[in-house]
Amino acid sequence: MNLDAYLQITLMNKNAVIITSMKGLVDNSCEEYCLNTWKPWCDRNNIDLITLSEPISDTSYTKPTWQRWYVWDILKNSGLDYEKIALIDVDTMVHWNSPNIFNEITDEIGVCVDNDNIGWVNQSIKGYKHMFSTSVDWTEYFNCGMIVLHKSSKKFCNEIIKFWENNHQSLVNLQDTLRKGTDQTPVNYIAKNYKVKYLNKKFNLTHLNRKEILNNLEFIDCGHIFHFNGFDKSHRTPLMEQTWNKIKQNYEN
């Protein structure tokens, strides 16, 4: 793991935002606009910012979405010990006045519901059901692009890692045939055995186009964390650049 240069020149704080942006597999050209917002926000809230940019294994086989769950081991091996962390996707931007997300949980797993595309969610839940004894209802399905974890969640993360390592070939096959995500639905199943807290949807405002708040960048007035998912990925970086150009003055000291 490479620590962001920003982190290297700061003292370690109690909490950290972890951005997964592993190079070489997917287009992460939007990283610039993501970090442009997260860096000053973290500064203002005395939070460390780390980018997971170096894969720990072949990303063509073990997707970055699976590799991020090794985060507690990665931090330990880097000599870092945090009370809470937030795993954040690189296709997000945080509002300059967003409340401190770490104040939203104590020792629960903090998530936001993401069921805008009910058909996709329901098909994914059914596609992975045979691998679990628990059940997931689409009304409680959450997005893994923003998840807040207390250090007591290490058992939860280890269970996800163990599930991947014990079932990797079946999961790779499902990713290629079912084509309904990678880790997200299995994580929803595994989380049924843990204490989950559903946060205000503003903390992970997904599917901006489906919510009809993409035009004129109306979502800026509607959320704390903007998640640019659920539409053609070729539009993602231009939209994030457009958003940054409109709001960048708010992140200046």
Image (tube, rainbow, N blue to C red):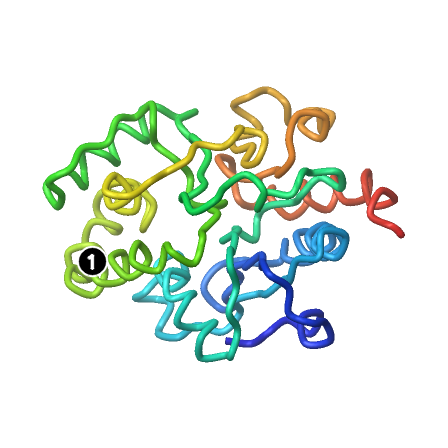
Q: Give the farthest residue toward the top.
A: 212
* Residue at (74% x, 25% y) in the render: 216
**In the rendered view, would you say 151 is above or below 209?**
below
Give residue 1's position: percent from left, percent from top: 50, 76
Question: Is 30 placed left or right of 81 in the picture?
Answer: right
When asked about the image quadrant of residue 157, the answer is: bottom left
The answer to which of 176 and 76 lies nearer the viewer is 76
Question: Is 212 placed left or right of 161 in the picture?
Answer: right
Give residue 15's position: percent from left, percent from top: 58, 58
Q: Secondary structure at mark 1?
A: helix
* Residue at (58% x, 56% y) in the render: 17
Q: Give the farthest residue toward the front.
A: 106
* Residue at (49% x, 74% y) in the render: 54
* Residue at (66% x, 25% y) in the render: 222
The answer to which of 112 and 170 lies nearer the viewer is 112
**In the rendered view, would you say 168 is above or below 8?**
above
Pointer 1 residue: 163
Give residue 77's position: percent from left, percent from top: 44, 79
Three-letter residue code for mark 1:
Phe
- Dot 1: within a 10 Å radius of its alpha carbon, few (fewer than 14), some, or many (20 or more) residues? some
Give residue 161's position: percent from left, percent from top: 27, 62
Total number of numbered discs in the rendering: 1
The answer to which of 100 and 183 lies nearer the viewer is 100
When asked about the image quadrant of residue 213, the answer is: top right
Question: Is 127 placed left or right of 7 in the picture?
Answer: left
**In the rendered view, would you say 20 is above or below 137?**
below
